[in-house]
Amino acid sequence: MPGKDEFVVTPYEVRGRIDYARLREKFGTQELTPEILSRIRTLAGGSLPPLLARGVYYSHRDLPALLDRYAKGEPFFLYSGRGPSGPLHTSHLVPFDLCQWLQEKFRVPMYIQITDDEKFWARAPLTKAEAEHWGVENLLDLLAVGFDPKTTHVFFDTRSIRALYPLAVSAAKRIPYSTVKAVFGFVPSTNIGLVFYTSLQTAPAFYPSWVSGKGVPCLIPCGIDQDPHFRITRDVAEGLGYPKPALLHSQMLPGLLGEQVMSTTGEQKDNALFLNDPPKEVERKIRRAFTGGRASVEEQRRLGANPEICSVWAAWRSKFAPKEEEFDQITRDCRSGALLCGDCKGMLIDRVQGFLAHHAEAREQWRDRAEDLIIESPPELAKG
Ligand code: TRP
């Protein structure tokens, strides 16, 4: 067990109170500075999305070099993914909302990986059929954030294995067991699927380079918990003759019950807003959500509330108040005591219900088309 101030973050375990600045140091990643953000803003034509402007993304690897090359006319591609183990909640959209924005502003291709194999190996009770079912359902949710079907491609691990396997084979040969054991904290009873798995998560980062026969830079937006996989990817890249991918890391969003992470492992269904929650559920969950409010209305009017610890404010910040003026207004009125938690929750309930209704429609429009985006085998010319 970690000590009082200790915490553990790996792709398979998040434990303890996370100190994000220290985590960046532990992982050896770089700070996403105002200078880098302002370069992104310029290259994107003058705007930044909430996830970048408000500090949800806070860390990176090698981003400035990728931006330099882009500015000189060298395109890159985006890659992110999802391990399907159940219905998605709003925090699962964080990497994909950012990718969609980047795809649109930078006009670059997107590769999504759905790792049904990984979740089958990682989650004991999950059957293969369930992982595949959730893979299809999750994919519709991810595409519904607005990806461009012409430049979006999907690896669905159990169906795309012919495309991924040659690269995974090359990567696996260069990854010693001692590395995965140390990086992921594997124990003797860990199944060997997971021991091999990281080479499959590496494969998409090299895929466009492999099939085109020339180095294509890759940018991976992901939660910081996924960084251990990509440290390995970056370690093997050079030896295989591919560019090291650049990374953009986000913090994990806090849960509605005041948990530091919006996770629902262990029956904490009220800790998250699922994308398929009916309107009544949304209302019930937000009504009981943890806030930074005071003990009484009188006290709150006098002293104001504390947005930094509030799960409702976190929802405004990351997604539901996209316009800066509105977000600033909510934050100011919260701090001053002008806005009470009940009213703020009422506003958020409306906003989330509106979003989910729109989302439900958008995802169903993908149902017949998602299949077409899945890459099943590499083009003939790919070699090596
Ligand atoms: N391992 C990720 C998960 O458990 C899924 C994943 C695959 C991924 N490829 C990725 C996440 C690339 C971020 C970026 O959800």
Image (spheres, rainbow, N blue to C red):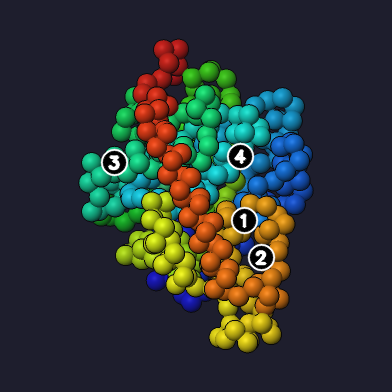
Q: Earlier in the sequence, mark 2 or mark 3?
A: 3
- Residue for point 36% across, 24% down: 376
* Quadrant of res 44: top right
| Three-letter amino acid code of the residue under disc 1 | Ala
Tell me how far mark 4 sits from mark 3, CA to CA. 27 Å
Tell me how far mark 1 sits from mark 2, CA to CA. 9 Å
Rate crowding at label 2 as few (under 14), some (14 to 19) or many (20 or more) other CA atoms within 10 Å: many
Return the mark for residue 321: 1
Is 17 drawn above or below residue 170 in the view shown? Answer: below
* Quadrant of res 46: top right
Tell me how far mark 2 sits from mark 4, CA to CA. 24 Å
Q: Is 346 positioned to the left or the right of 178 in the image?
A: right
Q: Are marks 1 and 2 in contact (CB under 8 Å)?
A: yes
* Residue on which disc 4 sits: 101
- x, y percent for residue 191: 27, 48
Q: Nearer the viewer, residue 137 or 330?
A: 330
Q: Earlier in the sequence, mark 1 or mark 4?
A: 4
Q: Earlier in the sequence, mark 2 or mark 4?
A: 4
Q: Earlier in the sequence, mark 4 or mark 3?
A: 4
Q: Are marks 1 and 4 in contact (CB under 8 Å)?
A: no
The quadrant in which the C terminus is found is top left
